[in-house]
Image: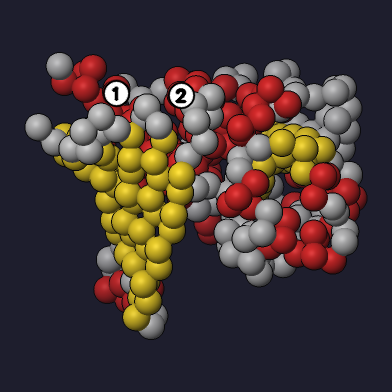
Amino acid sequence: MTAMIPFEEGQVGLDWIDLTDALADGHARPKATVEDVFLYRDPDTLLNRSAWIEGMGLAVKCATIFPNNKTMQKPMVNGAVNLFSDTDGQLEAILDFHLVTKWKTAGDSLLAARRLARPDSKSILIVGAGTVGKSLWEAYGAAFPNANFTVWNRSPDGAAQFAAACEGVQIATDLEAAVRAADIVTSATMTTEPILKGAWFQPGQHIDLIGAYRPDMREVDDAALQRSRIFVDSYATTMGHIGELKIPLASGAIKDDDVLADYYELDAFERQSDDDITLFKNGGGAHLDLMTSRYILDVWSGRTA
């Protein structure tokens, strides 16, 4: 029987550390075959992201993006993830789109932070007070339970609402000072121009970049990349597609071999010294949706058996 996994019920029993272990295990399997298909009707979009991993299964993540829904107080993005058996192709589960996206996005960043951030990190800055920022607060709190959290947001009202919803989070009003004081900086903004400057970075920091997803988007400047040891979740989804790396690669500010590893080379995700500045670009991808969906279904099946 096909499992129908909604958002709230689907979160019961999930664990951020277990998820990152599942993502690591997924990258030890044969490399995923992935394909994205877009359909457009201005201003609306249908996105289908598909992945197949030998021994794990197949996933098709369908998303509808209807920008005008905001005027009707409806969600702009809707969708679902269909998870199929690798053995016989049968539909095993239909998972809530927002459930998979939440856990995939923050779990992706957390896997890198568990490998690259200093284990004694005590100060974590979240740049951007949106939905993803709240997921990052949950995820990082699981791996760094003794850390103090601060949020910076362009809109003071947004930062205040974030702090009210997330217990113990402090509000930063000076972005430069907040970056300089942090052990970990995790950024999930919609900016197209860099807002994080490499000149602000301090020895030993870990920088986690989530926000940029289009070829015209960047959250950090050239100096940030040049001062850091750079890692990505997937060469395929980041190098030639997202402005964070695509633009500085095209300009010559960095070279291809400045990007040291992706998750298929997970053993290379390590510090050479406590003073390293490590930088991770979270590009997402359908293979991560598949790994996350399989983890969620496994937990769901164990709980409902």
Nearest the viewer among 217 and 177 is 217
The residue closer to the viewer here, 33 or 195, is 33
Local SS, label 2: helix
Classify mark 1: residues with Cα within 10 Å, few (<14), some (14-19) or many (20+). few
Question: Splitting the image into 4 quarters, where does residue 179 fall?
Answer: top right
Residue 246: give x, y in percent of width and height: 72, 61
Q: Which residue is located at x 16 percent, y 20 percent?
A: 304
| Res 295 → quadrant | top left
The vertical placement of 173 against 94, above or below, is below
Residue at screen point 33% across, 40% down: 58
Give left or right: position of 48 versus 276: left
Residue on which the image places disc 2: 22
The residue type indicated by label 2 comes to: Ala
Q: Is residue 80 visible?
A: yes
Task: State how far apart marks 2 and 1 are (Cα).
Answer: 11 Å
The furthest residue to the left: 1
Residue 207 location (% of width, % of height): 72, 40
* Mark 2 vs 1: CB contact within 8 A: yes
**Residue that carries the numbered disc 1 in the rendered image:** 298
Residue 208 in the image, given as x and y percentages of width and height = 67, 41
